C-alpha cells in the first residue's frame, strides 16, 4: 500500500445556500448532515484527484488518490471537521499539493476557510489522532484505494 503522505484538517460550514437544479435563480438553504459531509468529502477527493492525476478523456476509469478521512465534531463548539490522510503523487511538491488541497476544499459549498495541511511525520500517530485511538473506523466518512495496477503515477 502506498504511503499516505499528507494530512489535512478541513472545517465545514453548518449551512450553505445552493442553487436549485430546476430553477438556478432560486437559492435554498441546506443544513449540514452526515450524508452531506460524506458527499462533500467525495467531491473534494474527485477534484483533487482529477487535478493531481489527470487521466485521458477517453479513460473508462477515473483514477483516484488513496484517501482515508474521518469526521468529528469540536469539543467546545461542536463544529464538524474532517481529518484526512491523502496520497501525494511524487511529481507534486508538498507546497503545491497543499495549495491544491486548500483551494479544492474552499471551492466546496460546505467547505469552510479553516484548512490546515502538513506532511505526515508518523502514519501511526496520525491515524491514531484522526480516529481518536479508541474508535479506529467508527467515524470514517471516506475511503479510497487505487489498485497498484492502475496507479500509473506510482510506477518508477
Image: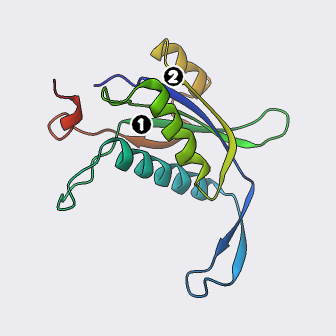
Q: What residue would you read off at disc 1?
A: 67
Q: Residue 149 location in percent, x, y?
A: 14, 37
Q: Residue 80 location in percent, x, y?
A: 71, 43
- Tell me the CA gap for discs 2 and 1: 12 Å
Rendered image: mark on residue 80: none
Identify the image quadrant of residue 152. top left
Q: Is residue 104 above or below residue 155?
A: below
Classify residue 152 as left or right of residue 109.
Answer: left
Q: Is residue 95 above or below residue 59?
A: above
**Which residue lies most toward the bottom here?**
23
Q: Residue at x 49, y 12 (%)?
A: 121
- Secondary structure under tag 1 reads strand
Front residue of this view, candidates 68 and 63:
63
Q: Residue 155 location in percent, x, y?
A: 17, 28
Q: Is residue 68 above or below residue 133?
A: below
Q: Residue 81 location in percent, x, y?
A: 67, 40
Question: Does the rendering let one see residue 148?
Answer: yes
Identify the image quadrant of residue 113. top right
Rendered image: mark on residue 127: 2
Question: Does the rendering let one see residue 133?
Answer: no
- Secondary structure under tag 2 reads helix
Tell me the quarter of the image containing the C terminus.
Answer: top left
Classify residue 104 as left or right of residue 34.
Answer: left
Q: How many marks?
A: 2
Question: How many neighbours does mark 2 have within 10 angstroms: few (below 14), some (14-19), or many (20 or more)?
Answer: many
Q: Is residue 118 above or below residue 100?
A: above
Identify the image quadrant of residue 147. top left
Q: Residue at x 58, y 57 (%)?
A: 35
Q: Residue at x 52, y 56 (%)?
A: 39
Classify residue 46 as left or right of residue 83.
Answer: left
Front residue of this view, candidates 36 and 43:
43
In this rendering, the label closer to the viewer, 2 or 1:
1
Amino acid at each position: 500500500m502506498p504511503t499516505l503522505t499528507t494530512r489535512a484538517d478541513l472545517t465545514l460550514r453548518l449551512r450553505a445556500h445552493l442553487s436549485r437544479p430546476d430553477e438556478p435563480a432560486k437559492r435554498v438553504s441546506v443544513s449540514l448532515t452526515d450524508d452531506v459531509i460524506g458527499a462533500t468529502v467525495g467531491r473534494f477527493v474527485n477534484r483533487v484527484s482529477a487535478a493531481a492525476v489527470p487521466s485521458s478523456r477517453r479513460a473508462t476509469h477515473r483514477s483516484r488518490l488513496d484517501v482515508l478521512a474521518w469526521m468529528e465534531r469540536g469539543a467546545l463548539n461542536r463544529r464538524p471537521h474532517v481529518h484526512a490522510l491523502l496520497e501525494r503523487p511524487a511529481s507534486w511538491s508538498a507546497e503545491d499539493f497543499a495549495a491544491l488541497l486548500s483551494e479544492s476544499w474552499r471551492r466546496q459549498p460546505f467547505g469552510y476557510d479553516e484548512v490546515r495541511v502538513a506532511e505526515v511525520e508518523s502514519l501511526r500517530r496520525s491515524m491514531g489522532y484522526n480516529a481518536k485511538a479508541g474508535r479506529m473506523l467508527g467515524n470514517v466518512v471516506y475511503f479510497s484505494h487505487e489498485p497498484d495496477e492502475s496507479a500509473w503515477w506510482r510506477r518508477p
